[in-house]
Amino acid sequence: MYWLFCLIFCLCSLGVKAKSISISEEEMSLIGKKIFINECAGKVENLTSWNVGTDFASLGIGHFIWYPSGKEGPFDEKFPSFLLFLEHRGIELPAWLRDPSDRDCPWKSRKEFMQDLQGLAMRSLRELLIDTIALQVEFIVERLQAVLPKILESASNPNHIRRQFFRVAESPMGFYALTDYVNFKGEGVLRSERYNGEGWGLLQVLELMSELNSNEAVREFVKCAERVLARRVENAPKEQVWLPGWRNRLRTYISDL
């Protein structure tokens, strides 16, 4: 078990001194439980899913995207990276997942995926995900170490973005808000993740933030995220059906404040 998990945000290449944030085992557990509920409704059977209307599988407590061979979607694929992460942690993968050069999703469509829910490969995949829930939390949290330098490099005002990031991170429930939002809607740096040139990731939320009162950082983050997601729906009206659920998820960031 990890009694203290310390993230060091190294920004030396950007001329900024490194900064560290420590997260207790209790906080790590809370983040994992909340993301598991957000993404999978807290149900083990939802660790392996393929949502209607999508062309990729969604796996684990973070619903890591996994594309079939030949598919190149606009969203950031994370499941192959998670498999590599597990190998680095000494986890033995099922035999059919061990070849790093052949790690595309073997199911070509949602129909194939759903028809094979009780197949040998699917069962071994589900067992792997059940056994590595703690490592999935660590993988999701560690992602933030790479996120901040990426969004700073893409930002027109990196000092503002850095300041807002740490305002949120150092506030109660702030690390959960940042971790979940990145897992939920991405960094906001990919050009493919834009509608009419406007993104909806962490970068876009931090750009909207302006207040300096650290006690209100997470509440302001939620308000700005709601504005960013409402703008996304304005650019893609068919996604209106998802907006109430997105707003409910954002409000979990402040439900315990």
Image (spheres, grey):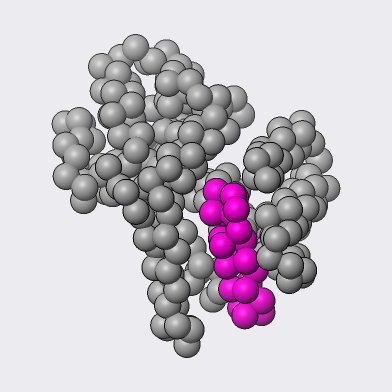
Q: Which of 147 and 223 is in front in this view?
A: 223
Residue 189 placement (x, y as % from top left): 58, 63
Q: Is residue 175 magenta?
A: yes
Q: In this view, does 60 lie above or below 218?
A: above
Q: Which of 61 and 108 is in front in this view?
A: 61
Quadrant for residue 253, please give it: top right
Q: Which of 2 and 149 is in front in this view?
A: 2
Residue 55 placement (x, y as % from top left): 52, 34
Q: Is residue 171 above or below residue 9?
A: above
Residue range highlighted in magenta = 156-178
Q: Main secondary structure of the magenta part?
A: helix
Q: In this view, does 127 lie above or below 157?
A: above
Residue 249 placement (x, y as % from top left): 66, 38
Figure disc tally: 0
- Residue at the spot 46% in from the left edge and 46% down from the top edge: 27
Report whether 250 appears left or right of 178.
right
- Residue at the spot 52% in from the left edge and 37% down from the top edge: 35
Question: In which quadrant is the C terminus drawn?
Answer: top right
Quadrant for residue 175, please give it: bottom right
Residue 75 visible in the snapshot = no
Residue 30 visible in the snapshot = yes
Residue 173 placement (x, y as % from top left): 59, 49
